[in-house]
Amino acid sequence: MVEFAWPFALLLFPLPWLLRKLMPAIRQPATALRVPFLQRLHTLPAASNPGSHSLRQLYLLIWALLVLALMRPELPGEPLPQVISGRDVMLAVDLSGSMAFRDMQLNGEEADRLTVLKALLDAFIQRRNGDRMGLILFASAAYVQSPLTHDLDTLRQWLDESFIGLAGRQTALGDAMGLAIKRLQDQPNQNRVLLLITDGANNAGQLTPIQAARLAAAEGIRVFTIGVGADNPQASNPEGQFSFSADPSIDLDEATLQDIALLTDGEYFRAADSDSLQAIYQRIDQLEPAIQQTRPMRSVRPLYHWPVLAALLIGFGFAARRLHAEVRHA
């Protein structure tokens, strides 16, 4: 189907009519002129009279063809192949029992760590246009909730449906990292990122976090680590889930998370509240910029030269016919 690159050029079509209406009429001379060849003018064809109806239609046709050419008609072809150059980002989210601790704020109200994390991760995922993202959920064990995909809406839904205790109550940081490395190692060597989010220390699994970090560094995978939890010993402890009354953030192994980031050329961030989490995601956007979504490219075949050619042929034909008529009646 024919498309138009500049469809708004159609607004120029009534321009001759507007000029005719707005411009003042030509004043007729007060005195008559004597034309010695008046009789010969009467013998010319009616089409040579600029005021004739047929001549106005001819002018209108030529003008319409020129406007059509200005609208840039084109015939779209097949989509052009595009090389996807976005990042491969794996999210590893901690679902251990301590993520239920209500020491953070969301929209001015007290909320548990996982709820705040979901809300801010949702906004972060939406900004990653052009990236492939995957989701790993871990606690006592780690499993892939979503492989690397461009379907970010489904990824957000799966993250939203996750809940504390889904994978146990402990924290297997090393196993979560190992699983992420396994999913990323077969991808292109550039732009591979793991975002590791936890509020505890490694106390389960077979692989230690430092061993996993060395594997990630060998594969060229950058790991950004985020330690979650506010320093607030008076935060509420729902349903007696913990055996301590103080803030469970004391269990956060920040030194190990910093070492992981250092070994993999990543960075460590501490998320003590929702504002700091938001700042962290903005910082990661700067470090690992997402590819902005662009309009799909298609090959096009321009057609504007056809109406231009038609207008020229009609104009030359009319001029030749008029010249022939004048020569014949000379």
Image (cartoon, grey):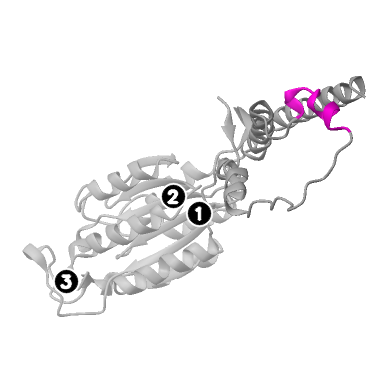
Q: Is the residue 73 above or below the residue 15 in the image?
A: above
In the image, taking residue 194 as reference, residue 298 lies left or right, namely: right
Any mark on residue 109, and which? 3
User: Which residue is painted at 22% across and 71% down in the image?
Assistant: 104
Nearest the viewer among 57 and 36 is 36
Whichever of labels 1 and 3 marks the residue nearer the N terminus, that label is 3
* Residue that carries the numbered disc 1 in the rendered image: 193
Q: Which residue is mark 2?
A: 90
Tell me which numbered mark, 1 or 2, is placed earlier along the sequence: 2
Give, as a single range, the part of the protein colored magenta: 37-48
Check disc 3 and give the amino acid type: Glu
Locate the C terminus by quadrant: top right
Q: Say which residue appears at 66% left-offset and 32% top-offset.
A: 56
> What is the CA distance from the residue labelled 1 to the residue labelled 3?
32 Å
User: Which class describes the residues within 10 Å of circle 1: few (<14), some (14-19), or many (20+)?
Assistant: many
Q: Are marks 1 and 2 in contact (CB under 8 Å)?
A: yes
Q: Closer to the camera: disc 1 or disc 3?
A: 3
Residue 41 is covered by the magenta coloring: yes
Percent across and percent down for residue 107 are: 22, 69
| Element assignment for label 3 | strand
Is residue 114 something one can see in this rendering? yes
Labelled pair 2, 3 in contact (Cβ < 8 Å): no
Identify the amino acid type marked 1: Val
The span from disc 2 to disc 3 (Cα, nearest Å) is 30 Å
